[in-house]
Amino acid sequence: MSKARIKKGDTVTVITGEDKGKSGKVLQVSPESGRILVEGVNFVKKHMRKSEENPQGGVVEKEASIHISNVKVSA
């Protein structure tokens, strides 16, 4: 594993993939898996069961992690 040079709060730009060109703030870094969570990038649809937190249930869109090699730090 290489040392992650990207930290929580940094602004990064996606350089490959479906969200190429988008930028956002890093919300979470997982150095052991080499993945980061970027605000407003890589949305996935998750089917949620009814619960106290989510009484309606249904399909929710949320950010998924992206590999650290697919982003670069913005100036």
Image (tube, rainbow, N blue to C red):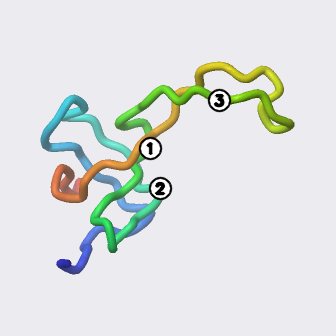
Is 45 displayed left or right of 70 in the figure?
Answer: right
Residue located farthest toward the front when viewing the structure as drawn: 49
Q: Tell me, yes or no, whether the two marked residues, 1 and 2, touch with CB atoms within 8 Å.
A: yes
Q: Which mark is residue 48?
A: 3
Q: Position of residue 63 (x, y in %)?
A: 46, 39
The secondary structure type at the circle numbered 3 is strand
Can you identify the residue that label 2 sits on? Answer: 27
Which quadrant of the figure has residue 1? bottom left
- Above-or-below relation of 30 to 58: below
Name the residue furthest left.
16
Q: CA distance from mark 3 to mark 2?
A: 22 Å
For the residue pair 48 and 39, the one nearer the viewer reads as 48
Q: CA distance from mark 1 to mark 2?
A: 6 Å
Q: Is residue 63 above or below residue 31?
A: above
Amino acid type, residue under disc 2 in the picture: Leu
Q: Which mark is residue 7?
A: none
Q: Which residue is mark 1?
A: 39
Q: Residues within 10 Å of mark 1 (few under 14, many from 20)?
A: some
